Image (cartoon, helix red, strand yellow):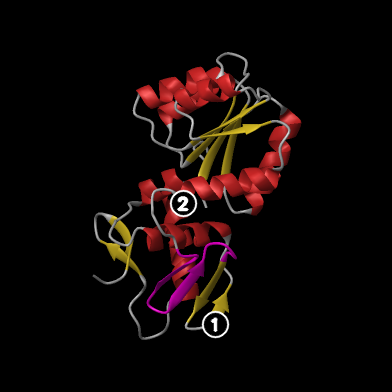
Amino acid sequence: MAKILLVEDDIDLCTTICDRLKAEQHVLEVVHDGKEGADRLRLYSYDFVILDWNLPGKIGPEICREYRGHGGSAPVLMLTGRGEVQDKETGLDAGADDYLTKPFSTRELAARIRAILRRPQAVIDDCLSEGGVVLNTVKHTVSVHGEFVHLHPKEFAILELLLKSKDQVFSADALLDRLWKSESDATVDSVRTTIKRLRQKIDRDGQPSLVRTVHGVGYKIGQG
């Protein structure tokens, strides 16, 4: 699951991309103007950026170059109808991590996103586990001591993030920023309510909660 910014002025293509990526549990934010896309990248944090080349206001390579120049580190995948080698070279030299020529299959797009998001680690297991809880990142399933439980998307997203970052404590504000849309009406109370529901589903009577509260700081996985 990733928080993704899609900057694309083709409305129909945006709808098709969003349908595919939301089915894979990603959080999508969409803008149709290059300048607005650049502004979002300055104001908010994303796990992944899908950037069209030809945009009103500001073109994709320019946005990408500015983003990298300001220290932006999220992977960027460039979309374009330009298929010449020199065009690909321009996009990659601007800071893009990958390049997809239109028309393309959204299945390929989703697969490329999965591949790029795996790059920071040499090996990523499909299953994340701790204390009898097993989360499968591909099948989007969770089991507790072998018994499958149903989690809502935000519950799943919080559990996945905490399991992937076992040594890190996340404040409610940090979870809100990472897992909810930037302009969502959700508040830190929404985060606390979601964590409460998550605990009710994965914790077992008589055992400490897997999602530990670090008082005055935030939340982490485990008791250490």
- Residue 161, given in percent of the width and then of the height, sits at 42, 57
Does residue 27 lie above or below 96 as drawn? below
* Residue nearest the viewer, comparing 81 with 63: 81
Mark 1 vs mark 2: give the one in front.
2
What is the CA distance from the residue labelled 1 to the residue labelled 2? Answer: 28 Å
Residue tagged 2: 118
In the picture provided, is 211 more to the left or to the right than 216? right
- Label 1: which secondary element: strand
- Residue 138, given in percent of the width and then of the height, sits at 57, 62
* Residue nearest the viewer, comparing 118 with 212: 118
Q: Earlier in the sequence, mark 1 or mark 2?
A: 2
> Are there few (<14), some (14-19), or many (20+) residues within 10 Å of tag 2?
few
Query: Mark 2 is on which residue type?
Result: Arg
* Residue nearest the viewer, comparing 202 with 62: 62
**Residue found 72% across the figure and 42% down from its top:** 105
What's the magenta region?
Answer: 125-140
Does residue 157 lie above or below 129 as drawn? above
Q: Does the magenta stretch include residue 128?
A: yes
Q: Is residue 41 magenta?
A: no
Residue 69 lies in what quarter of the image? top left
Does residue 58 lie above or below 122 as drawn? above
Q: Is residue 184 at all visible to an observer of this figure?
A: no
- Residue 81, given in percent of the width and then of the height, sits at 68, 24
Query: Mark 1 is on which residue type?
Result: Glu
**Residue found 44% across the figure and 27% down from its top:** 95
- Label 2: which secondary element: helix
Residue tagged 1: 147
**Residue found 49% across the figure and 40% down from its top:** 48
Does residue 6 lie above or below 137 as drawn? above
